[in-house]
Amino acid sequence: VGYNMSLRRKAFDYFEPALKPYWQNFEMEACLQVKDRGYKVIFDFSNVVKHYPTNQAYAGGREGDLEVKIFNAAYNQALILAKHSSWSIGLFRFFYLMLIGNTNAPGLFLLPFTVIHYRNIKREFMIAKRVFRSRLEGWNLGKVYAKRQ
C-alpha cells in the first residue's frame, strides 16, 4: 500500500480527491502521474518494509465492510485507468475490467470461479453486480477527468 514509495515531489502534484476510502490504488494514480510527467518509477528492492495491516480492507475473505474492501477498490481502479488511458488502450482496459476483473472484484468471466471459491452463489452475484456498477461509475468519472487534463 505504498509504504515504500519514494517519489520526487515535482513528479506528481496531488492525490486524486475522487478516490473513495480506503484509497486503494492510490499508488497506481501516483505512478501514472509520474509517468505522464516524463519521470520513471524505480523500485528499490533494498527498501525493507514490515507490513502490519491494521485496516480490514486488507483482510482476506468476504467478511467485513464490502464497500471498503471491494466496491471502493473497484471504483478507484476504474477511475484511475480511465483517467490515464488513451481511447485505444482505454477500450481494452474497460472490457478487461468488466469481463475479467480479479478474484476480489470479478468480472463476468471470473464470477463462476469466485462462486466456487467462496461457496455462496447469492452473495457472489450481488458482489459482481455492485462491482460492475462501481467500475462503471468510476470509469465514467475518470473519462470526465481525462478530458480536463
Image (spheres, rainbow, N blue to C red):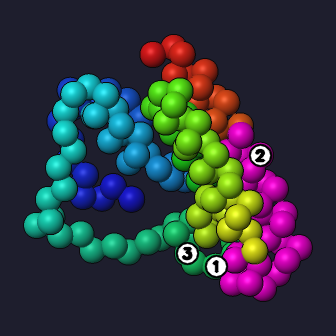
Q: Is residue 61 above or below residue 90?
A: below
Q: Residues within 10 Å of mark 1 (few under 14, many from 20)?
A: few
Q: x, y percentage for residue 128?
A: 77, 60
Q: How many discs appear?
A: 3
Q: Is residue 114 magenta?
A: yes
Pointer 1: what residue? Answer: 61
Q: Amino acid at mark 2?
A: Arg
- What residue is shown at x 38% (from left), y 48% (from top)? 27
Query: Which image quarter holds the N terminus?
Result: bottom left
Pointer 2: what residue? Answer: 133
Q: Secondary structure at mark 2?
A: helix
Q: Is residue 101 above or below residue 89?
A: below
- What residue is shown at x 78% (from left), y 85% (from top)? 119
Quadrant of res 63 = bottom right
Q: Secondary structure at mark 1?
A: loop
Q: Which is closer to the viewer, label 1 or label 3?
A: 1
Q: Secondary structure at mark 3?
A: loop
Q: Which is closer to the viewer, label 1 or label 2?
A: 2
**Viewed as shown, does residue 103 lie left or right of 131?**
left
Q: Is residue 131 magenta?
A: yes
Q: Which mark is residue 49?
A: none
- What residue is shown at x 77% (from left), y 46% (from top)? 133
Q: CA distance from mark 1 to mark 2?
A: 21 Å
Q: Which residues are magenta?
A: 113-136
Q: x, y percentage for residue 13?
A: 32, 27
Q: Are marks 1 and 2 in contact (CB under 8 Å)?
A: no
Q: Are marks 1 and 3 in contact (CB under 8 Å)?
A: yes
**Viewed as shown, does residue 24 lie left or right of 94?**
left
